[in-house]
Image (tube, helix red, strand yellow):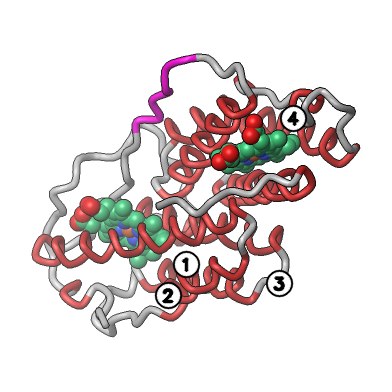
Amino acid sequence: MFTLFTAAAGCGASGKPEGQRFTPAPASSERATPPLVPEAATPTVAEHMRDHFTQAIRARDAIIRGDLAAMKEPAGWLADHKVSETLPDTWKPHVGDMQNAARLAVQANDLAVAADAIGAMGTACGGCHTALGTPLQFSGKSPEGQESSVLDRMLRHQWAAERMWEGLIGPSEVAWSAGVAALQEAPLHPEMLADNKSPPQEVVDLANKIHTLGQRGKTTQEPDARAKLYGEYVSACDSCHSRLGVRLKPRS
Ligand code: HEC
Ligand code: HEC
């Protein structure tokens, strides 16, 4: 087993490119000054972060598939991962936030609660990157083409969920904006979803809700509020799919 951030004591600037133009206003406790990331530690931290990234994506995708059971293993890894004692004090609250959120996800018996926790975890990732002056950069670049079929629109929603996630963990304003914009660019018309038959009321409500989330998302700035909105969005995927008998396969 890895020890998290073992080589993290020491000092020096990180070689990371400067962050994005926009950074959500940090909470006052986070007002630590720019890069506190020791140069010597960089390979370890970066490697470690890639593990976090992968596990967090596994957890997030399981939520989108509506597979609570499959979410627990990666979320458990994130919750229980050993934290090095040598971790600088300024980092610790962020690790704690991330682990607490991951633990709430592990304990959740309900998809909406789990989705909310995964959103909070994403925001905790972003909170640390902001505080340490190492925000991640994402392009938010839109794919080409039009969304005509239901499937095309769904792939666009999958894309939107990924951008919004990047918006949380970066934190990245560019990615967040691109993601929420797609919610309205690929509207879900209820009759289209139910093969032109009259769709169940629940599906109509969900389609409307997604549209509203897209609108709200544009003006939602605060990281915790974005996390909640993200959670609402990704728990709607399975609410609708299970109602219509759609099953997403795990991505290979
Ligand atoms: C305790 C602080 C902290 C927390 C919590 C944290 N990160 Fe990081 N993260 C960092 C630092 C510092 C870097 C910069 C490492 C470097 O490149 O030197 C980083 C870099 C990254 C990178 C880029 C790695 C690379 O290849 O350069 C990714 C991806 C990442 N974090 C994802 C995540 C995700 C996902 C989470 C939450 C599950 C998370 N991080 C939580 C501090 C944190
Ligand atoms: C209001 C209903 C509704 C919501 C909300 C919804 N979907 Fe769908 N989804 C559908 C329907 C209907 C299909 C079946 C489309 C088809 O096969 O033509 C589908 C199919 C899919 C597929 C293709 C499945 C396959 O392999 O055939 C993906 C991927 C997908 N949705 C992703 C998502 C994601 C990600 C979200 C949430 C961010 C989401 N959907 C939210 C109704 C919905």
Among the two numbered marks 1 and 2 on one chain, the one whose residue lies closer to the N terminus = 2
Among the two numbered marks 2 and 4 on one chain, the one whose residue lies closer to the N terminus = 2
* Horizontal and vertical percent position of residue 229: 65, 45
- Decide: is 21 above or below 136: above
Among the two numbered marks 3 and 2 on one chain, the one whose residue lies closer to the N terminus = 2
Amino acid type, mark 2: Trp
* Horizontal and vertical percent position of residue 158: 53, 38
Are there few (<14), some (14-19), or many (20+) residues within 10 Å of tag 4?
many
Amino acid type, mark 3: Asn
Q: What stretch is highlighted in magenta?
A: 139-145
Q: How far apart are marks 3 and 1 (CA)?
A: 19 Å
Helix, strand or loop at mark 1: helix
Mark 1 C-beta to ligand 1 under 8 Å: yes
Q: Main secondary structure of the magenta part?
A: loop
Looking at this view, is 71 or 232 the one in front? 71
* Horizontal and vertical percent position of residue 11: 13, 65
What residue is shown with label 3? Answer: 109
Amino acid type, mark 1: Met
- Decide: is 177 above or below 42: above
* Horizontal and vertical percent position of residue 3: 25, 80
